Image (cartoon, grey):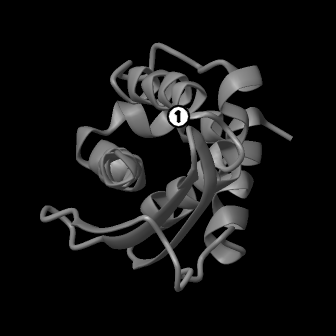
Amino acid sequence: MQLDNLYQEVILDHYKNPQNKKLNTTFDAQVHHINPSCGDEITLNVTLEGNMVKSVSWDGVGCSISQASVSILTDLLIGKSLEQAQVIADSFMHLMQSKGTEKGDESLLEDAVALAGVSQYPARIKCALLGWMAFKDASVQALAKQA
């Protein structure tokens, strides 16, 4: 099986069987982000325990890329410190800005490397980043609430 086909399967699997796609009723911050260019929407809840990401839950509608990307994000970031989450998010952002020249660090990004090909399509990068921007926003709000 070609690597591209495997990556497509990873994306489709996260799209059809999304992780943490049910909004928790208790949370430290909730944000709603929309990609105006295509209409994808995500509502994302974050709960912190000190400096640790205790939970990330979400609901949304949109293309397979946006929905798979936020599913992958939840798998990657739950249980991580905010510093670790920032390193992962920065690495994913770098991957999305690579215009197809980077493959991504699989040891850090895990399933998110399946989205590397998206970086060749500027209109789709916003889809892949929708959940990541929502997480960034929500984690800042959650951290401010703790202070």
Q: Quick one: which residue is furthest to the front in this view?
A: 147
The x and y percentages for residue 112 are 61, 40
Q: Classify residue 82 as left or right of residue 124.
A: right
Indicate whether 65 appears above or below 44: above
Q: Classify residue 128 as left or right of residue 85.
A: left
Q: Residue 122 is drawn in which quadrant?
A: top left
The x and y percentages for residue 30 are 35, 69
Indicate whether 104 appears above or below 48: above
Quadrant containing the C terminus is: top left
The x and y percentages for residue 44 are 42, 68
Q: Quick one: which residue is furthest to the top in this view?
A: 101
- Please name whichever residue, 100 or 108, is drawn nearer the observer in this view of the structure: 108
Q: Residue 35 is drawn in which quadrant?
A: bottom left
The residue lying at 36 percent from left, 44 percent from top is 136
- Please name whichever residue, 57 or 38, is drawn nearer the observer in this view of the structure: 57
- Please name whichever residue, 63 or 47, is drawn nearer the observer in this view of the structure: 47
- Disc 1 marks which amino acid? Leu
Indicate whether 37 appears above or below 101: below
Task: Tell me the SS state at disc 1.
Answer: helix
Dot 1: few (<14), some (14–19), or many (≥20) neighbours within 10 Å?
A: many
Q: Which residue is mark 1?
A: 82
The residue lying at 77 percent from left, 45 percent from top is 6
The x and y percentages for residue 97 are 33, 23
Quadrant containing the N terminus is: top right
- Please name whichever residue, 31 or 112, is drawn nearer the observer in this view of the structure: 31
The residue lying at 72 percent from left, 45 percent from top is 79
Q: Quick one: which residue is furthest to the right in this view?
A: 1
Indicate whether 63 appears above or below 26: above
So how many labels did they put on this image? 1
The residue lying at 32 percent from left, 42 percent from top is 125
Q: Classify residue 62 as left or right of residue 54.
A: left
